[in-house]
Image (cartoon, grey):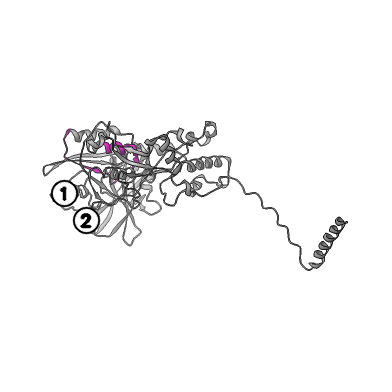
């Protein structure tokens, strides 16, 4: 009886709704939304590799957004979405071999380093030659430090094409002639880029002045492919019993951290080196810090090396700096500072206090058949920040110089000559005696600004400080 009663109530309710709402249209039924299209299988595989690496080793892995890799159609864009807001250094590449070669000084270029400027109140861009490596296309075309480039392919240099002076396969440029009325057109020169093996020791000199024997070395990259050249230069200084050392890093974007460790150990006080004091401490993400504390504490600090072949054992050093000084160059400065009377001369450095690992698919994927279609890809994630033995780190705005000197390229003096403004200021600080420099015939009174500089297409990623090759077994 109760069952019939319930059925009656349900029917009454149904007809009440039906006839009570006869003026209202029935709701439309929304069609099912189509399933979103997924990225191609290869793209998803690359995305998965990137996701694994970043979730595992990235310094800021806890700050990463949650992104569904199935719907990311561009792996490089996907990688950029993962980056922490302060990270301007991590990168992904589809040709890791080319990047690694560039760190070793092997790359296709013209062999010149350029500073790009713009005259005030104009859109006119020009380039100034900072230095030229010997036996390169630029050297063979007779370019020298301080030369001016004012045209590319017979036309103005613009914001859209100025990097072609570094990146293109071949170029035709017009040099500028500096006169009393400004810059006029000079001769036209063509060059073809070629693969070069660049020695980072650009020049070395011994300058004797006011009873001091001052060693000078211009070092343009912390490359692991030219230890012999660096050691030979340091040995030359040792054999000639220099009293002081000036290391020119103004154009050095960085490189391998263990090369900076080697260089620091070659110049620092003997007791510091022989006792292998702490050069820097390394700070990883939470999981890796805990892992290294338990399993391999050596990863948490970098010490001086007591087995370097040359030990100058100095207690003071002068370092020439500029906005081109980054990464391992800054490690060289802050690492030595607690142990030496260290003076920086020039302009503020770039500001990079982090290190990275080079990680390829083979490091994290077991079977080669699973990555053979993207085996050249690689990720260079920031995995640690460093501090010196006094805890100095996070110099985001660069390291301020103790003696500020502008690197004037319109009146450029060859590197290594005591009249060159930055070196001149260092020598004057060392000796306490001014250097009377001859006035340059070159002069420009038109206000201008320098807005970029570089050597090749790898300039940005050369600012990485690469930690010695990671042991794949520790990757989780």
For the N terminus, the image quarter is bottom right
Say what secondary structure mark 2 lies in.
loop
Q: Say left or right for 338 vs 59.
A: left
- Which residue is at the front of the view, 415 or 186? 415
Specify the quadrant of the image occupied by residue 471. Answer: top left
The numbered disc on residue 443 is 2
Q: Nearer the viewer, mark 2 or mark 1?
A: 1
Q: Position of residue 431 (x, y in %)?
A: 14, 46
Q: Say left or right for 373 vs 328.
A: right
Say what secondary structure mark 1 lies in.
helix
- Which residue is at the front of the view, 183 or 290? 290
- Which residue is at the front of the view, 361 or 143? 361
Magenta span of residues:
239-265
The residue pinned by badge 1 equals 428
Q: Position of residue 10 (x, y in %)?
A: 82, 59
The answer to whether residue 395 is above or below residue 309 is below
Label located before the other in sequence (2 or 1): 1
Q: Say left or right for 375 vs 346.
A: right
């Amino acid at each position: 009886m109760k069952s019939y009663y319930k059925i009656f109530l349900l029917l009454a309710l149904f007809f009440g709704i039906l006839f009570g709402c006869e003026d209202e249209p029935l709701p439309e039924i929304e069609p099912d939304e189509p399933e979103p299209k997924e990225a191609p299988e290869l793209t998803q595989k690359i995305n998965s590799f990137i996701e694994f690496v970043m979730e595992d080793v990235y310094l800021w892995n806890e700050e990463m957004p949650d992104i569904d890799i199935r719907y990311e159609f561009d792996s490089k864009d996907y990688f950029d979405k993962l980056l922490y807001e302060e990270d301007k250094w991590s990168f992904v590449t589809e040709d890791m071999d080319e990047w690694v070669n560039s760190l070793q000084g092997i790359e296709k270029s013209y062999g010149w380093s350029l500073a790009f400027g713009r005259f005030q109140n104009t859109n006119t861009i020009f380039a100034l030659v900072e230095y030229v490596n010997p036996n390169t296309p630029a050297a063979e075309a007779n370019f020298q430090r301080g030369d001016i480039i004012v045209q590319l392919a017979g036309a103005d240099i613009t914001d859209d094409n100025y990097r072609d002076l570094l990146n293109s396969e071949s170029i035709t440029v017009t040099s500028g002639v500096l006169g009393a009325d400004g810059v006029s057109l000079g001769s036209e020169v063509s060059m073809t880029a070629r693969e070069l093996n660049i020695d980072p020791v650009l020049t070395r000199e011994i300058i004797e002045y006011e009873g001091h024997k001052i060693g000078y070395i211009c070092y343009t990259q912390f490359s692991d492919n030219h230890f012999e050249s660096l050691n030979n230069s340091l040995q030359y200084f040792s054999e000639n019993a220099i009293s002081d050392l000036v290391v020119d890093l103004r154009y050095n974007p960085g490189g391998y951290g263990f090369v900076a460790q080697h260089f620091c150990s070659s110049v620092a006080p003997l007791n510091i080196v022989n006792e292998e004091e702490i050069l820097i401490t390394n700070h990883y993400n939470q999981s890796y810090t805990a892992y290294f504390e338990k399993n391999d504490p050596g990863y948490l600090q970098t010490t001086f090396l007591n087995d370097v072949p040359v030990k100058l054992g100095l207690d003071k050093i002068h370092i020439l700096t500029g906005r081109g000084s980054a990464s391992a160059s800054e490690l060289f400065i802050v690492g030595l500072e607690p142990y030496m009377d260290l003076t920086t001369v020039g302009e503020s450095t770039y500001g990079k206090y982090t290190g990275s690992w080079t990680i390829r698919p083979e490091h994290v994927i077991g079977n080669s058949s699973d990555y053979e279609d993207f085996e050249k890809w690689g990720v260079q994630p920031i995995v640690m920040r460093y501090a010196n033995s006094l805890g100095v780190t996070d110099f985001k705005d660069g390291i301020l110089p103790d003696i500020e000197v502008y690197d004037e390229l319109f009146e450029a003096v060859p590197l290594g000559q005591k009249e060159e403004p930055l070196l001149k200021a260092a020598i004057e600080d060392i000796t306490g005696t001014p250097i009377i420099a001859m006035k340059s015939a070159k002069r420009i009174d038109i206000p201008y600004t320098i807005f970029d500089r570089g050597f090749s297409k790898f300039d940005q990623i050369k600012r990485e400080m690469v930690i010695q090759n990671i042991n794949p077994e520790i990757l989780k």
